[in-house]
Image (cartoon, rainbow, N blue to C red):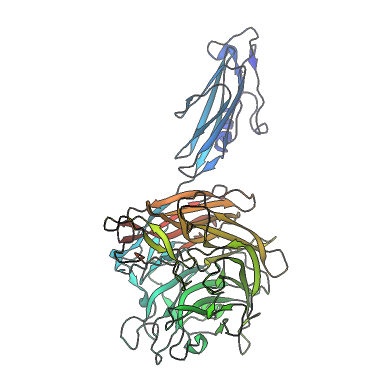
Amino acid sequence: MIGCSMRPFTTVSNFVRQGFSGRAKSSAVLLGLTIVLASCGGNSGGGGGGGTPAPTATLTATPSAIFPGQAVTLTFTSTNANQGSIDMGEGPVGANGGVTANPTVTTTYTFTATGPGGTATATVTVTVNQITSFDGLRQSDGVTDQDVDPNGAIGTKQYMEYVNTAIQAYDKGTGAPVWPAAKQIETLWPSGPCAVNQTTGKPAIQLDVVIIFDRLASRWVVGAKTSNPNQSVGYFFCIAVSSTDDLSSSSLTWNSYSSIKLDPILKGNGTHTYFPDWPKLSTWTDATGQQSAYYATMDLQDIDNGNAEVGAVVCAFDRTGILNNPGNIKSESCVNVSHQNDSVLWSNGLFLGHSLIPADVDGTSVPPAGRDEFMVSIENPLNDGVTLTSSALNLWEFHVDWTAATPLTVTSQSPISVPVADYIPGCYLSVPGNPAITNCVQEPPTPANPQQPQIIDSVGDRLMPRLAYRNFGSHESYLVTHAIQTGNNSQNATQTGVRWYEFRDNGSGTPSLNQSGTINPDDILYRFLPSIAQDKKGNVAVGYSTSNRFTNPGIYFSYWSLPNATAPAEILITQGDGEEVTNTAPFAGKWGTYSSMTVDPIDDCTFWYVNEYFAADNTWLTRIANFKVPGCQ
């Protein structure tokens, strides 16, 4: 091999011997490894034999796995070369340096270094993870309310979605609807107080409904509350559990239950029972099954006082009994956590710690034996019309014992106060005197009012579902998120971003704040209405809405690795071509108060997210997206 120069092999010496078999080379490329090849001046077409040194070449990609639209830095080095080029459209690049590439599909790049002694090549593969999305429920599915509230979950075979007041399921592989037409939600409760409003004769369930997939039992669970302020009828919580994980099965049935009358738990103002609002739902159990329950939480609103937030109620339903003995309502228990004598959580008639988010199990590793259910809630600023900043969250602990006379108990009416970095809830006091109204997210002005941006709700006065729980063995991780004001935009002080928190339990039995951050990569867009989860590798994804006075609402997500502490990267799911328009002052339209991020129970890697957008002004749709974060298979 006279005139040959051998270059070192990078990380593949155990697999590739001299001569570089085609099979070994292909395998290394598929692994995305940097390959350094030997070259021989006499065999490279015009080489400088007689001892002229042959070139060497290396090529690396950072990062080596991306989503479409993200940039990659290709770094190349060489020796004994005076020129170089990279294929796949990059062209001449010099002998050493770096270039930026934007592949839209998985691509293998080849760097060729050329010198008097011949040529050398190196290759690297950039994996491009695709985002798949399709439209879910829309107005043409019989849903006319502009308060869209998209909510859903991914199961083993389908994605199930709810929008006021319809449900539909979609095939995971094709996105095709499972049922010929969307169904009205009351079809899950064919009789009883959850079916028909006994006063009006109309469906008893209106607006907010939540869907989860019990990953430990492979069952769908749907929760709702009735909407009837008539004192003689009262309020009920409705829960329905599927008989199978397959929503297309001819054998599918729903085991539907209506709870006991909630009014004694809800309490009231002397004239009306407090209105149960904004339900959340979760699956919880411990390793022994003793703590097995479906948890539901509801806010309490005073309908005679501007729908002021005046408390919260937590209910637990005997999960083991429901799953093992379908057809009969099993044990249930509710507790009101908002007693007026708790001065810590009250300020001038408002309950500051409302909207409890219950921990919901992801994956199949159950919590340790004896682990109680934990929930988190916001700690809103004092209701004095001046204070805007908070510096704490609330951590609640609930214990269930289905053999006790009162099965559900809360460890303390005053939760653990968790200090966090100061924050101003999104759009707080945008309407002076009413902190529950958080409409300040800007949309573009309309031709009828060219100087006045349209505004929509940031839902900034609360934490957002889900409180996503995972047991990693070495620790238990809880994630939650909400919209806060960023303070970054001097032209628009109300700009909102997404704040996230991770709570961890390292064996003490009580989680504590481990880390947090704010997603706001620019001072341009409002980011709001988030929902968060993490995959089995600890990769986090949070989806949210975006908007500003120049840009119609869109849907984005950000992702990062908790174990590697990487910085969040923001990715577009879809950009709307319209907005919600109202032509009367203060030009504030409705907006949904739910979005949902869940993880596929089959591979425990694929994230599924649903949110709303507008195809044209006042023409809304929902979008269901799925994707894998690089590094999880």
Which residue, as the protein is rendered here, is positioned at the far left?
448
Q: Quadrant of the N terminus?
A: top right
Which residue, as the protein is rendered here, is positioned at the far right?
508
Q: Quadrant of residue 65?
A: top right
Q: Residue at x 41, y 75 (%)?
A: 253
- Residue 34 lies left or right of residue 164; in this view the side is right
Q: Residue at x 46, y 30 (%)?
A: 88
Q: State whether residue 174 appears in this view.
A: no
Q: Residue at x 35, y 55 (%)?
A: 444
Image: 444 above or below 196: above
Image: 322 above or below 578: below
Q: Quadrant of residue 236?
A: bottom left
Question: Percent x, y for residue 625?
Answer: 43, 55
Question: Percent x, y for residue 589?
Answer: 35, 65
Q: Nearer the viewer, residue 13 or 335?
A: 335
Which residue, as the protein is rendered here, is positioned at the far top?
50
- Residue 498 lies left or right of residue 204; in this view the side is right
Q: Nearer the viewer, residue 374 or 303?
A: 303
Q: Quadrant of residue 612?
A: bottom left
Question: Percent x, y for residue 572?
Answer: 44, 49
Image: 250 above or below 69: below
Q: Nearer the viewer, residue 349 or 625?
A: 349
Q: State whether residue 568 appears in this view.
A: yes
- Residue 190 lies left or right of residue 243; in this view the side is left
